[in-house]
Amino acid sequence: FFHRGTRTHTCMRYNLALTSGAVFAITWPRIYNPAAVSRVPFCSIHPQNALLRLRAGAHSCKNMISYSLLLQQSAQTSNALVEYWKHSTDFNKLAQYEGNMTVARDNEDGEKLQEGIDYAKDKGVIDPNFVPDPYIEIDVLGKNPHQVADTILQHIQEQTGGFVLVLVGLSGTGKGTTVSVLREKLETQQSKQVVTWSNGNIFRSVTLLAVTWCEQNGCDGFDATKALTKENIANYMTMLSFGKFNGKYDTHIHGLGLDMLVSQVQNTELKSPQVSKSIPTVAKVTQGEVILFAAHAVDVMGKDGLVVLLEGREQTVNYVRTPFRFSLVLSDESLIGKRRAAQRIMADALKRLPKTGGASDEDVVAALDQSLASMVAEVPS
């Protein structure tokens, strides 16, 4: 049984009694939520461990987070933490905050992307009347990335040769992890040659050309008004070509004195401070051009027998023509915030533990508890 003490919950003393292998809280610390705590099986001879588990809202030893699980920093880890803290008021407060922030960022990004798409339509770069092929929706609620990947593969199991697969979804639905699992399964189970595609390096390549144009034309820093005219952008795109170079598919930058392959400069010239600083400005007015370049590139690779996995927002991948289009959704949108909160906590908790050697379950629980307490304290009231 539980004796909840006084209704004011001001007593900070506690006693633990062992009966038939179980832990019973005899007095109730003020920080606990009476509605969230139930009979807790005995997990350790250390009373502090049981106290921490009560504070976390954990109900079963089966949900104890081990050091090996924390070390994975995977979807399995975050899912375990969501289950572990499902009755925790603090965790749910943090999760709600993270969920609201994630949705707000997604909405803001979506609006900016749509502005770029509308701009591209207005200047005639992309067809304003184009209607994309429909997406197959997959509810990822209660599914791990392997199960989501298996569901997708069921739709393409009879596909031979190369093809392009598009995957979209809001932040927190597991797109990136699902793409990684899909790649592994396609390579190991079907012996496919798989590549992933991102528009990021193409935006960086266009930005590098625009920055170089400014340098060669005596601009005072990056002058978007002069560098990003309709004529200049069209000219920059003629300086990019996609194909096989040295036996591998790559993007070639050739113009304004530049002659380089993206794969060779993606971590150097394409990530220079001036390029990184100017990308948002360039991306806003080159969405259409980059979308068409990407659509051509993935089509070339798919026709050559490769499986191309393309992850992104709908606005940017709608123009890629393929029947294999999937949208990951969460019927319980609260999980978006819970997953994000769990990801932040597990990364922070790992930093609190010794870098060499393992850690006991009690150490892991303490680190997780400290990370949660630290983060929830920063949530605006």
Image (tube, rainbow, N blue to C red):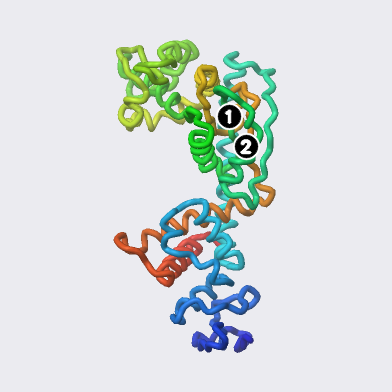
Between 345 and 285, the residue placed more toward the observer is: 345
Q: Are marks 2 and 1 in contact (CB under 8 Å)?
A: yes
Measured as percent of width and height from the top left, residue 46 is found at 44, 80
Res. 222 image quadrant: top left
Residue indicated by mark 1: 165
62 above or below 147?
A: below
Q: Secondary structure at mark 2?
A: helix
Residue 118, can we see it?
no
- Crowding at label 1, few (<14), some or many (≥20) Cα neighbours within 10 Å? many
Q: Specify whether 121 is left or right of 362.
A: right
Measured as percent of width and height from the top left, residue 86 is found at 60, 64
Q: Quadrant of the C terminus?
A: bottom right
Amino acid type for the residue under numbered disc 1:
Leu
For the point 59% across and 34% down, the residue is 167
337 above or below 138?
A: below
Q: Quadrant of the N terminus?
A: bottom right
User: Of label 2 and label 1, which has the lower sequence position?
Assistant: 2
Amino acid type for the residue under numbered disc 2:
Ile
Between 198 and 306, the residue placed more toward the observer is: 306
For the point 41% across and 16% down, the residue is 244
Badge number at residue 152: 2
